[in-house]
Image (cartoon, rainbow, N blue to C red):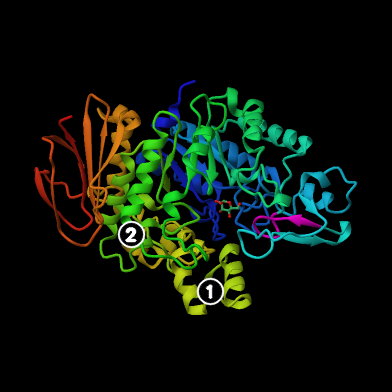
């Protein structure tokens, strides 16, 4: 089967914040349909749609109460069919975000299953007579008492997100059926939310990478998407390159690719993670990314990303004052677009949108942030309110979920109503309307990068060429080469506010792309955040 997704660019839509068509302050499917021209112009191939299934929205849709229906906030099943059809006309495929590690506690399986141990779906969830010390990713114990059966149920995320028990064969069959029904409707694949947990053995304290994880994925592959030409991507927070190769084995027995976070955890503290972040170690960042490039070469497939709905926007992450937002946005894109893997754009990244930086806890709606505040500041008192808020401004997930910045009118053209989260203050200068026709904009730069990957003399090289990190110990320059034996590309990026001099050792053949739109010479003074790619002699 043709691995079309190797040359594709994926665009993540976070539906609540993308485009509101009916004035209720929340984005919806008709809003997305209205923006397909914009997405086609950008040049993306696939939309990864964060969950739009029925949900009480405890975790913005990652808590599903019916996998077969659409949350009325976002529209109807007819809107979904229309989105699939209209997107196809724009040469865009739709990939659904499927959460199979847990459901909402309002899913009928749980509603019935929790009533009695004898009910058919009781076994669809994970129960224990005694809680063990497992903690939830969203703070506190991972176990919650259930009166009617006098047992505890497992929730690796919020209390309203009970974990599914993949050991139940009838659960697995139900899941495969619903997946096939969605595939039959014309979707092009799935993003599998926290899939690493489905093989858990919680009573032995094993959550990620349990013994049956890969057998389950292989069974799912055979029963559903394996025989269809899909893009499948597994989200994994706890994975090394050996396991990643298994997940994305070119033999097609599991997923097309993996979405892993090694480079995104680089500034997390050992004890409190992102709520007590460390300064960036740029040399480590380069080594980490390079390790994945080298290890996955020819035997697996990785996703390339700097942003998504769970983490700070990269241009804001290590830079509070953002003196050069557009330059930084272009520079980060250059670093990742010439690596091997499939690039993912998180909505607004293509405009250089920044974190919203909400200073007040009252503004936050995200269950993870609110639970962490309760746990770290109120219950355990390991962080002060001030310390926590300093971290929340950078890492609290609502900061990356602020509405899309379409234009400089009220609410940035996102809604005619009251937006569910306040807009980021810079929307009057950073917005799509200002950028689409400006050849110097971040948007136009992304368009060029996408075309270079998809249709240029370098496409094959970017897909297959060997990777070599140069200047590994330089603490401000990211320099690497890609070489497929026919051609060689040199990528140079200056992640600093200083002018840096760099000498290119090999003879330059031509410039591929440059953030400063100027000719590149053998010895060059790189401006702050400047990045370029040149073809050099092999
Ligand atoms: C994934 C999602 C995140 C969600 C969590 C639980 O990490 O990306 O948004 O909160 O899973 O479903």
Compared with 494, 375 (above or below) is: below
Q: Is residue 200 above or below residue 496?
A: above
Q: Main secondary structure of the magenta part?
A: loop
Provide the residue designation for mark 1: 361
Front of the two marks 1 and 2: 1
The residue segment tinted magenta is 152-161
Write the residue at 67% across / 32% down. 181
Mark 1–mark 2 CB contact (< 8 Å): no
Q: Is residue 305 visible?
A: yes
Q: Inspect this view and state whether residue 85 appears.
A: no
Left or right relative to 35: residue 99: right
Q: How far, Cα to Cα, is label 1 from label 2? A: 25 Å
Q: Secondary structure at mark 1?
A: helix
Q: Which residue is mark 2?
A: 430
Quarter containing the C terminus: top left
Badge 2 element: loop
On residue 517, the disc is none
Q: Does the magenta portion include 407? A: no
In the rendered view, does 317 fall on the left or right side of 97?
Answer: left
Name the residue nearer the viewer: 40 or 200: 200
Vertical relation: 512 (above or below) 99: above
Q: Who is closer to the viewer here, 188 or 136?
A: 136
At 61% from the left and 57% from the top, the residue drawn is 59
> Is residue 151 rendered to the left or right of residue 538?
right
Q: Residues within 10 Å of mark 2 (few under 14, many from 20)?
A: many
x, y (%) of residue 147? 86, 62
Asked if the stretch drawn in magenta spans residue 157, the answer is yes
């Amino acid at each position: 089967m043709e691995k079309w997704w190797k040359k594709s660019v994926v665009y993540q839509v976070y539906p609540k914040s993308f485009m509101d068509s009916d004035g209720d302050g929340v984005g919806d499917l008709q809003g997305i349909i209205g923006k397909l021209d914009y997405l086609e112009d950008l040049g993306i191939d696939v939309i990864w749609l964060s969950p739009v299934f029925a949900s009480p929205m405890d975790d913005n849709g990652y808590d599903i109460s019916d996998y077969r229906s659409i949350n009325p906030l976002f529209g109807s099943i007819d809107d979904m069919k229309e989105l699939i059809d209209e997107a196809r006309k724009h040469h865009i495929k739709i990939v659904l975000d499927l959460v199979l590690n847990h459901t909402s506690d309002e899913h009928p399986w749980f509603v019935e299953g929790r009533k009695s141990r004898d009910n058919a779906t009781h076994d669809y969830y994970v129960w224990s007579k005694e809680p063990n010390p497992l903690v939830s990713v969203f703070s506190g114990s991972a176990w919650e008492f259930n009166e009617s059966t006098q047992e505890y149920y497992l929730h690796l995320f919020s209390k309203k997100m009970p974990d599914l028990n993949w050991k139940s064969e009838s659960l697995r069959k139900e899941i495969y059926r619903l997946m096939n029904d969605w595939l039959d409707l014309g979707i092009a694949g799935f993003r599998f939310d926290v899939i690493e947990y489905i093989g858990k053995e919680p009573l032995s304290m094993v959550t990620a990478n349990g013994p049956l994880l890969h057998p389950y994925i292989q069974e799912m592959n055979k029963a559903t998407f394996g025989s269809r030409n899909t893009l499948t991507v597994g989200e994994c927070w706890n994975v090394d390159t050996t396991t990643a190769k298994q997940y994305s084995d070119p033999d097609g027995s599991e997923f097309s690719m993996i979405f892993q976070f090694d480079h995104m955890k680089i500034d997390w503290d050992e004890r409190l993670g992102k709520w007590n972040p460390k300064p960036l170690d740029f040399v480590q960042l380069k080594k980490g990314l390079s390790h994945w490039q080298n290890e996955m070469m020819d035997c697996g497939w990785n996703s390339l990303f700097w942003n998504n709905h769970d983490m700070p926007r990269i241009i804001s992450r290590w830079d509070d004052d953002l003196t050069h937002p557009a330059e930084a946005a272009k520079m980060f894109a250059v670093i990742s677009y010439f690596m091997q893997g499939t690039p993912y754009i998180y909505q607004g990244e293509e405009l250089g949108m920044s974190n919203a930086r909400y200073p007040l806890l009252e503004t936050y709606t995200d269950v993870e942030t609110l639970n962490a505040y309760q746990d770290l500041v109120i219950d355990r008192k390991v962080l002060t309110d001030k310390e926590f808020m300093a971290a929340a401004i950078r890492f609290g997930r609502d900061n990356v979920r602020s509405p899309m910045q379409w234009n400089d009118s009220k609410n940035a053209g996102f809604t005619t109503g009251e937006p569910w989260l306040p807009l980021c203050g810079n929307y009057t200068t950073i917005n799509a309307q200002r950028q689409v026709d400006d050849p110097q904009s971040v948007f136009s730069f992304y368009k060029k990068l996408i075309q270079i990957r998809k249709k240029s003399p370098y496409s094959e090289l970017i897909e297959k060429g060997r990777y070599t990190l140069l200047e590994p110990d330089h603490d401000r320059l990211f320099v690497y080469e890609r070489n497929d034996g026919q051609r060689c590309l040199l990528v140079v990026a200056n992640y600093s506010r200083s002018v840096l001099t760099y000498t290119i050792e090999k003879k330059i053949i031509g410039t591929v792309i440059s953030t400063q739109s100027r000719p590149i010479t053998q010895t060059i003074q790189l401006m702050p955040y400047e990045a370029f790619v040149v073809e050099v002699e092999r």
